[in-house]
Amino acid sequence: MKVFLTRLTILILVLGLLGIGVWWYGQRHAPAPVSYRTAPVTRGDLVATISATGTVEPEEVVDVGAQVAGIIDALGQDPRHNGKLIDYGTPVEQGTILAHIDESLYRADVDTMQAQLDQAKANAQHAEADLGQLQAKLYQAERDWQRAQKVGPSDALSQNDYDQFYANDAIAKANLAVGKAALAQAQKGIAQAQATLKRAQTNLGYCTIKSPVKGVIIDRRVNIGQTVVSSLNAPSLFLIAKDLTRMQVWASVNEADIGNIHPGQPVTFTVDAYLGQVFTGEVGKVRLNATMTQNVVTYTVEVTTDNSSGKLLPYLTANLRFEVSRHQDVLLVPNAALRWYPQPSEVAPAIRATPATRERDAHGAGGAPEGRATRGTVWVHDGQFVRPIAVQIGLSDGTMTEIQSAELRDGTLVIVGANTRESGGTDTTNPFIPQLFNRRPQPPPQ
């Protein structure tokens, strides 16, 4: 009897352990429960934009150079502060002295040209005096010849004297013509000397470099003692921005997007110097001289913006968004909702049997790509399953997409993804030890 009870007890324990093992195996290999990530349908404004990067530039810049060579011996005085020299950021007026080049050689040239002019004037006076003498001699020769003609060759006037009076008259006329030519030449010498002197004086004036416009110095490229060498291209000494209250952003736009850019288009941009602050502007011009870098063609787009606040500094890097289109008060869903598609077993049985669903199952497709198709599908809860809702796709900004649907309302939850037990991580426990009370809890369906 005792043996029988012992065997019966062992049998019961074996059957119990066997049942527990079967139950544990079934639990381990049962389909993992699915929880869905959802997002609400929202109503709001949607703006489609094109992103680009660019550089903040002054709207108009004047490059001030030097037309003569020499050593910089002085810089101009800051008009705001006595004793302070012209430097970066100095505001200047038209005519403000920026720098001065050593003028010793050019002053010597002016003195030389002035002496030559004085000499030319003296030569002209001498020629004019000579002309007066020649005119007097001509007058005397003419009177002598006139008297000789009245008397004629006779006993009172020999033939030789008669011929001499004639020759004297002709010589006097010729000498007068020579005198007039000499005077004209002397006067031309004065004009030439004056032109040479004016040129030397102009070069001397170039030794004082002045601002041609009113603006702000954004770059100073010379120091006192530096030698300026003038050549075919004037050396650049100062860079002056005429008006920093108006700025431009030179943006590089890809050729695939340039067709959506046009003058007057609104633009927003940010700079790293002012995080969180958005600046506005508009497209002013699309330059036609494209550039190619590693087979990528880009165009430079000029964006004008107001800088009355003075916050935008030249050459800041800007991140721009060109507004392509704007829709207001529309239904919006995350783009992930249009891309997600469930497993066939997750679809409600009544929906699963429809031809449209079978066709989607065959293709394995979900939402349509943004910007190409006009139809798409989003999924919502239907008890323990999900069901599709067909929507019309509109504008997209890359994160949210405009939709139209008679079934969806503001606040409706649409599915954007799914979580299973396997997605939570890798189970590292010993598979041979039953974990009856140590299973990880599954997140409830959202």
Image: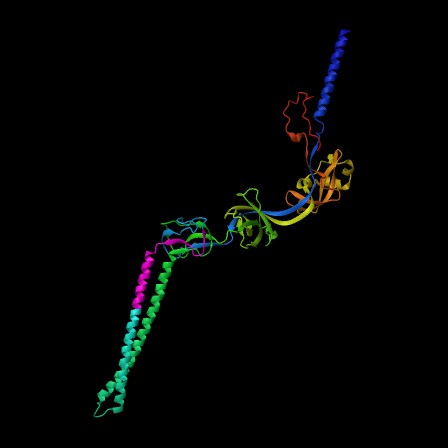
Q: Is residue 301 left or right of residue 151?
A: right
Q: Where in the figure is residue 242, as x and y percent of width and height?
A: 48, 54
**Camera-nearest residue between 80 and 179:** 80
**Looking at the rendering, in which quadrant would you find the C terminus?**
top right
Name the residue at 61% across, 49% down. Answer: 323
Q: Which residues are magenta?
A: 91-120
Q: Is residue 55 left or right of residue 200?
A: right
Q: Could you say which quadrant of the image residue 351 lies in?
A: top right
Q: Could you say which quadrant of the image residue 179 lies in?
A: bottom left
Name the residue at 72% across, 20% down. Answer: 20
Q: Where in the figure is residue 265, as x and y percent of width and height?
A: 60, 52
Q: Where in the figure is residue 407, as x and y percent of width and height?
A: 75, 42
Q: Is residue 121 above or below residue 74?
A: below
Q: Is residue 111 magenta?
A: yes
Task: For residue 238, say whether it is visible.
Answer: yes
Q: Is residue 81 left or right of residue 171?
A: right
Task: For residue 320, say whether it is visible.
Answer: no
Q: Is residue 423 above or below residue 253?
A: above
**Camera-nearest residue between 71 and 29:** 71
Q: Is residue 345 above or below residue 71?
A: above
Q: Is residue 207 left or right of residue 360?
A: left
Name the residue at 28% across, 82% down. Answer: 139
**Camera-nearest residue between 411 and 389:** 411
Q: Where in the figure is residue 430, as x and y percent of width and height?
A: 64, 22
**Camera-nearest residue between 63 and 399:** 63
Q: Is residue 96 magenta?
A: yes
Residue at the top extreme?
1
**Looking at the rendering, in which quadrant would you find the N terminus?**
top right
